[in-house]
Image (cartoon, rainbow, N blue to C red):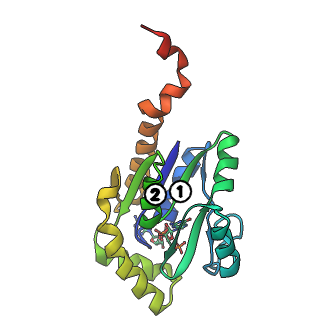
Amino acid sequence: MRVFVSGPSGVGKTTVIKEVLRKNPDLVLSVSYTTRAPRKDEQDGVDYFFVSRDTFEDMVRKGAFLEWANVHGNLYGTSIEWVEEMESRGFHVLFDIDVQGVKQAKEKGLQGCFILIVPPTIDELERRLHSRGTEDRDSLVRRMENARAELAMWNLYDYLVVNDSLLECIETVHAVILAQRASKSEMIGRLPWLHTIA
Ligand code: ADP
Ligand code: 5GP
């Protein structure tokens, strides 16, 4: 099972995903490659693989990415090798990728469940991004401009989950994942004997 989660910067994706992963031990977060500098509390190989632009561009040339995009001025990409390695070990994979990445995933015909996390209001989004204290003025302005463009693409997704009450948002994303686990497309491969019933 593949779960794709998007949402504008500051909406609470990282916070929600952390709790959802805690509830689903067989689900892992795809660790992306990025040219962005690490934040204070971020670890290489855990939050991202932090690489130079040269290394990233070399990986693009070699076809190492399932999808990649320039987001807020930095490059971000999903490693095919990393995802396949986790899936071969029996894990389901959750992707925290932006709307451009979701478009590419859909164009490639990737199957999965596509979730957009929506802020209660644009003002609340700005307040959260500001209160996180990780962005300088330029980055904050750029992220808020991009937020509108990302939210305008809501129709690409299967589920729109509002992150107003954090607990409710976590419960709803978790419920969507439980439903996805029981979907026909996920289950039929695990129930071969159902094919044999006339
Ligand atoms: P993202 O990963 O989408 O950029 P974060 O998870 O870093 O967002 O969250 C941005 C900020 O908003 C953080 O300071 C986080 O603690 C806060 N936050 C997340 N969810 C909520 C919520 N439901 N209500 C209030 N603040 C929230
Ligand atoms: P941040 O810099 O706040 O960690 O992430 C910025 C944006 O990049 C978020 O919208 C996040 O979803 C997106 N992102 C992170 N990794 C990837 C990736 O591998 N591919 C794409 N397309 N977007 C990503």
Q: Which residue in the structure is indicated by mark 2?
A: 5
Mark drawn on residue 74: none
Residue at position x 41%, y 42% in the image: 175
Labels 1 and 2: the sequence-earlier one? 2
Asked whether disc 1 touches disc 2, contact meaning CB atoms under 8 Å apart, the reply is yes
Residue at position x 49%, y 75% in the image: 71
Q: Nearer the viewer, residue 158 or 136?
A: 158
**In which quarter of the view is residue 82 placed?**
bottom right
Q: Position of residue 113 (x, y in %)?
A: 43, 47
Query: From the viewer's perspective, is 140 left or right of 43?
Result: left
Residue at position x 42%, y 30% in the image: 184
Q: Nearer the viewer, residue 173 or 165?
A: 173
Q: CA distance from mark 1 to mark 2?
A: 6 Å
Q: Position of residue 16 (x, y in %)?
A: 48, 59
User: Which element type, helix, strand or loop, lies under badge 1?
Assistant: strand
Q: If the picture is divided into quarters, which one holds ligand 1?
A: bottom left
Residue 194 in the image: above or below residue 24 = above
Residue 123 in the image: above or below residue 164 = below
Q: Which residue in the structure is indicated by mark 1?
A: 95
Residue at position x 71%, y 70% in the image: 44
Label 1 residue near ligand 2, CB within 8 Å: yes
Q: Judge the density around disc 2: few (<14), some (14-19), many (≥20) Cα neighbours within 10 Å.
A: many
Q: Position of residue 29 (x, y in %)?
A: 59, 55
Label 2 residue near ligand 2, CB within 8 Å: yes
Query: From the viewer's perspective, is 134 left or right of 171?
Result: right
**Is residue 182 shown to the viewer in this render?**
no
Q: Quadrant of the C terminus?
A: top left
Residue with the most extreme front position? 61
Say which amino acid is labelled 2. Answer: Val
Q: Position of residue 187 (x, y in %)?
A: 49, 29
